């Protein structure tokens, strides 16, 4: 009798398991390569954390600063931990007022060569960005560590230095392995295996120690224990750039602002972390011109370069949009420069929300909104006040599917966005905001809004 009473319960449980299995199989990861979000702009979180790495002492030429931005109308208490590769550091506290900013040099008062920063915030709505001293690159701070990190395009030739800056934000030691992909194929240097970094500590990996005189190196960092914040530092001549990387290789990517200026160099660099050749197609969109698709093959565990500028098939006519599709998942990066010097930038993942700020004080040369979806989206742009006043809504835009629009043409009142800090919100998570800083030739420094990384 009791077995008959239990039968319906068994049936219900079985049906529940079936439903859960079906729903799980239908679930899709829309943005598999995006890094952990810091963009908690609603301010309702009880506490948040920001982690920033990629700083050196001034003598090593890769110094920079961190800028914390409060996007809410309430003040927040912030505790900032400064650490170095020598395992020393200190903590300081500050009150970050409504809509206020605070900038600082992470190596001030800390002995060492390389530095990381952890910021604990009471509440949400505070975001962070790191900017190189020479204003040649920017990168967002992230909100939690990761366990896999990929990046492409590093250069270890004479005159260049490629370093992985690694910060452990947790209270326990972390262990990781580093492998590379280049013309040498797959290499897992023994000295980069089982590499340990202590709790709340900073470490650096100089790729050139093991991967010598290579101009296009892809990297995979696999964390065996713990989680890490990782930023690639590429120093090429006087130019320092942050390579923020992705969490996994991808079949597709888009670079909305690729320069075609005379005397400029613009390349899409690829690394193939798999055992099968990757056939890559690049669609180049340049206003008023028809550009044939560019194709190339990336060998297994190898690397390859597609030149956008100079290229006899692509005229010098401002900025091009370059979208990539590949038969196998690859790692991609945009490399821009004027010859021997290059700056690297990783592809972006679509997001519903960005914070765009003129953190260098020089404005922007170009700023573009890109809708990666086939459906149209609405975009709200809100300007933050630097005097503690309420934000002002600038505009509501509509962007058709699979299109881009210049921020300058959509919001002409902002001119070159000099001194502006604004929040850009989309009706769906298919937006990419891409910007370039003023350079000669144009397009040498490509940055993104604080895009949730």
Image (spheres, helix red, strand yellow):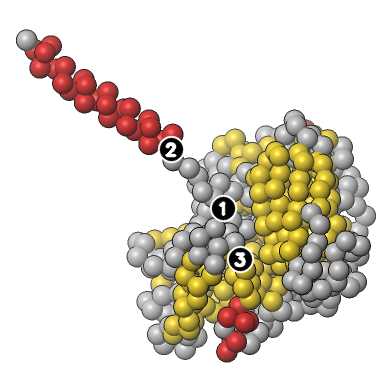
Q: Residue furthest left?
A: 1
For residue 372, above or below residue 441: above
230 or 107, which is in the foreground? 230
Q: Secondary structure at mark 3?
A: loop
Q: Is residue 265 left or right of residue 129?
A: right
In front of the other: label 2 or label 1?
2
**Disc with the residue nearer the chain's start (2 vs 3):** 2
- Distance between mark 2 and mark 3 Cα atoms: 28 Å
Query: Which label belongs to residue 26?
Result: 2
Query: Which label belongs to residue 403?
Result: 3
Question: Residue 322's image quarter?
Answer: bottom right
Visible residue check, residue 200? no
121 or 188, which is in the foreground? 188
**Disc with the residue nearer the chain's start (3 vs 1):** 1
Q: How many other residues sit within 10 Å of disc 3, few (<14), some (14-19) or many (≥20)?
A: some
Visible residue check, residue 274? yes
Question: Residue 74's image quarter?
Answer: bottom left
- Which x, y percent locates residue 75? 39, 76
Residue pictured at 77% horizontal, 41% vertical: 279
**Disc with the residue nearer the chain's start (2 vs 1):** 2
- Circle 2/circle 3 CB separation < 8 Å: no
Q: Secondary structure at mark 1?
A: loop
- Circle 2/circle 1 CB separation < 8 Å: no
- Which x, y percent locates residue 304? 83, 46
Say which residue label 1 marks: 35
Q: Quadrant of the N terminus?
A: top left
Q: How many other residues sit within 10 Å of disc 2, few (<14), some (14-19) or many (≥20)?
A: few
- Which x, y percent locates residue 252? 66, 49
């Amino acid at each position: 009798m009791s077995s008959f009473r239990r039968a319906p319960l068994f049936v219900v449980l079985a049906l529940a398991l079936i439903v859960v299995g079906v729903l799980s199989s239908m679930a899709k990861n829309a943005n598999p390569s995006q890094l952990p979000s810091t963009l908690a702009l609603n301010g309702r979180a009880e506490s948040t954390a920001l982690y920033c790495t990629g700083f050196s002492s001034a003598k090593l030429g890769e110094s920079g600063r961190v800028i914390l931005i409060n996007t809410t109308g309430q003040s927040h208490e912030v505790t900032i931990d400064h650490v170095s590769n020598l395992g020393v550091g200190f903590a300081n506290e500050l009150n970050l007022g409504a809509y206020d900013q605070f900038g600082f040099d992470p190596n001030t008062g800390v002995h060492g060569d390389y530095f990381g920063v952890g910021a604990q915030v009471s509440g949400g709505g505070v975001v962070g960005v790191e900017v190189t001293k020479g204003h040649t690159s920017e990168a967002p701070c992230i909100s939690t560590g990761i366990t896999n990190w990929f990046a492409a395009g590093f250069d270890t030739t004479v005159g260049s230095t490629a370093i992985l800056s690694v910060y452990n934000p947790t209270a326990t030691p972390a262990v990781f392995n580093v492998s590379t992909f280049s013309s040498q194929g797959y290499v897992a240097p023994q000295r980069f295996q089982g590499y340990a970094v202590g709790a709340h500590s900073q470490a650096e990996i100089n790729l050139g120690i093991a991967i010598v005189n290579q101009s296009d190196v892809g990297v995979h960092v696999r964390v065996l224990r713990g989680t890490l914040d990782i930023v690639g530092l590429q120093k090429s001549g006087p130019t320092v750039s942050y390579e923020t990387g992705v969490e996994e290789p991808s079949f597709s990517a888009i670079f909305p602002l690729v320069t075609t200026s005379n005397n400029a160099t613009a390349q899409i660099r690829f690394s193939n972390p798999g055992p099968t050749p990757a056939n890559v197609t690049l669609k180049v969109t340049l206003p008023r011109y028809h550009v044939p698709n560019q194709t190339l093959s990336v060998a297994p565990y190898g690397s390859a370069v597609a030149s956008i500028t100079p290229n006899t098939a692509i005229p010098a006519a401002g900025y091009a949009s370059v979208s990539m599709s590949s038969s196998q998942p690859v790692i991609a990066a945009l490399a821009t420069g004027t010859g021997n010097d290059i700056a690297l930038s990783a592809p972006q993942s679509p997001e519903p929300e960005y914070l765009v700020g003129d953190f260098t004080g020089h404005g922007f040369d170009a700023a573009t909104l890109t809708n990666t979806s086939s459906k149209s989206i609405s975009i709200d742009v809100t300007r933050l006040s630097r005097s503690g006043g309420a934000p002002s809504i600038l505009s509501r835009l509509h962007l058709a599917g699979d299109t881009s629009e210049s921020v300058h043409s959509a919001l002409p009142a902002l001119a070159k966005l000099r001194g502006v800090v604004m929040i850009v919100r989309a009706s769906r998570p298919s937006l990419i905001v891409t910007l370039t800083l003023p350079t000669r030739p144009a397009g040498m420094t490509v940055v993104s809004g604080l895009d949730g990384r």
